[in-house]
Image: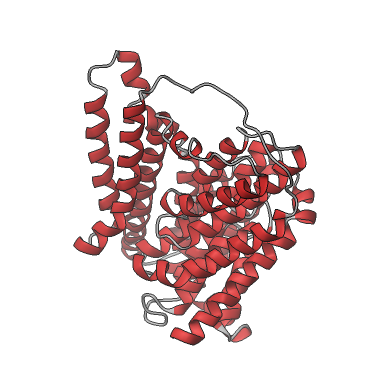
């Protein structure tokens, strides 16, 4: 039974990796793998009721992540529908390319921690298009955006799906992830920005474009600040109540729903529909949420049949040093999606072995969050940039991957120095 589950998982995984070559969305492979893994598990087990209990427990944990992502994505989409992110763009006044790049990297880094690396990448590429950069400058700027967005998401419990998974799984706390990984993440973003800064010279002008809709300035500000505040409120809510993060996210979403309904109640029906939560929910990336669901179902089945525990023991024997292990996991995440890698790590290493806020989990949050920048396909931010700007895989590999690797390694070394000083 265990062999069949592993084979099904590996086949699904290869399908995910070869998504672009097969021209089949990776979500289909993830969901198929999740369903078939549990099917093989229950058909090969003599204790059906135990499998059912394990499935119920796994689904309840996965549901928490799904509810959290649904709420977060809806809030971000609502802000975007009101052109709320234009408030950030409008405040960038400099014409110097070097200064602009530094500002954009800085904004990208901190915005990613509040929103997420994928959304931030889309917002920043939209911002980039408002300036007259050359084609090669846009290429390197996309590299800075991807690396900064991933680095920014790594030190926030809501900045990346993997850090959210670790936070919800109780492997890390919101305060510890910020305290212990913000400096390595800053080092990662700064090193990459400095190394690519020489590619930009002279001044840049803006490309004038009109507003995307007729949202009043007051409504834009209300939704933007209410939305960002509601996202920041989530970790505060968890710290005060000790309830799961998705409860705070659902509370934030409900309050923002009330606010949006109140400020649009006197508008015409068409405008109310376009700027409603209902419309925002239709625009969220549902396939990505289903992808996470399928992957987590696969991983949970492997966890319950004991495969991940055996794998953890073998890895600990082959790579006895914890810091080297997490460093390698980060590099592997550039080839294989970091979501299943982190999910597998959560299943392989228990809280009894590595308790909450242990150096292993905090280091994993950094490496899994930033290691994917080494390849353009190694992170959601990279894939988004690749699609939006038609970035060539080999060109990124030749010109940016080495910079991303050095930045990632610099941050990892910084984390190690911190660990030696404070652990």
Please state, as top left, top right, bottom left or bottom right, where the C terminus lies in the image: bottom left
Compare residues 265 and 368 and report the one nearer the observer.
265
Q: Can you tell which quarter of the image residue 284 is in?
A: top left
Q: Can you tell which quarter of the image residue 338 is in?
A: bottom right
At x 57%, y 55%, the residue is 148
Up-down relation of residue 133 to residue 174 (above or below) = above
Residue 400 at x, y percent in the picture? 73, 55
The reply to whether residue 161 is visible in this rendering is yes
* For residue 418, side relative to residue 247 (left or right): right
At x 54%, y 39%, the residue is 93
* For residue 162, side relative to residue 314 (left or right): left
Compare residues 37 and 365 and report the one nearer the observer.
365
At x 49%, y 61%, the residue is 154
Up-down relation of residue 115 to residue 256 (above or below) = below
Up-down relation of residue 78 to residue 237 (above or below) = above
Compare residues 314 and 377 and report the one nearer the observer.
377
The reply to whether residue 4 is visible in this rendering is no
Q: How many marks?
A: 0
Residue 71 at x, y percent in the picture? 34, 43
């Amino acid at each position: 039974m265990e062999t069949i589950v592993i084979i099904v998982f590996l086949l699904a995984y290869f399908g995910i990796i070869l998504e672009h070559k097969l021209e089949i969305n990776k979500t289909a492979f993830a969901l198929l793998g999740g369903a078939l893994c549990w099917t093989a598990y229950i058909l090969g087990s003599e204790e059906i009721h135990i499998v059912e209990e394990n499935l119920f427990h796994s689904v309840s944990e996965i549901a928490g992540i799904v509810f959290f992502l649904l709420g977060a994505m809806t809030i971000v989409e609502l802000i975007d529908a009101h052109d709320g992110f234009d408030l950030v763009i409008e405040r960038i006044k400099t014409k110097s390319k070097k200064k602009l790049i530094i500002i954009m990297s800085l904004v990208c880094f901190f915005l990613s921690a509040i929103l997420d690396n994928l959304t931030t990448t889309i917002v920043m590429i939209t911002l980039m298009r408002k300036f007259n950069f050359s084609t090669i400058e846009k290429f390197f700027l996309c590299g800075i955006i991807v690396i900064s967005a991933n680095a920014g998401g790594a030190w926030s419990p809501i900045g990346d799906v993997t850090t959210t998974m670790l936070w919800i799984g109780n492997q890390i706390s919101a305060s510890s992830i910020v305290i212990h990984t913000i400096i390595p993440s800053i080092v990662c973003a700064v090193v990459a920005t400095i190394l690519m800064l020489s590619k930009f010279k002279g001044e840049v002008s803006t490309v004038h474009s009109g507003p995307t809709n007729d949202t009043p300035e007051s409504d834009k500000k209300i939704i933007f600040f209410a939305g960002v505040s509601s996202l920041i409120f989530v970790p505060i809510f968890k710290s005060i109540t000790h309830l799961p993060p998705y409860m705070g996210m659902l509370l934030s979403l409900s309050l923002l729903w009330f606010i949006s309904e109140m400020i649009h109640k006197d508008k015409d029906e068409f405008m109310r529909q376009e700027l409603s939560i209902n419309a925002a929910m239709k625009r969220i990336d549902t396939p990505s949420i289903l992808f996470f669901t399928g992957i987590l179902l696969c991983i949970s089945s492997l966890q319950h049949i004991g495969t991940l525990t055996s794998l953890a023991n073998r890895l600990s024997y082959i790579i006895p040093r914890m810091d080297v292990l997490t460093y390698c996991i980060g590099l592997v995440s550039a080839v294989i999606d970091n979501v299943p890698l982190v999910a597998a790590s959560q299943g392989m290493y228990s809280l009894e072995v590595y308790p909450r806020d242990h150096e292993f989990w905090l280091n994993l949050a950094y490496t899994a969050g930033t290691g994917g920048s080494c390849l353009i396909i190694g992170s959601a931010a990279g894939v988004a940039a690749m699609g939006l700007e038609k970035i060539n895989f080999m060109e990124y590999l030749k010109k940016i991957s080495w910079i991303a690797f050095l930045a990632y390694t610099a941050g990892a070394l910084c984390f190690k120095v911190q660990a030696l000083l404070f652990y």
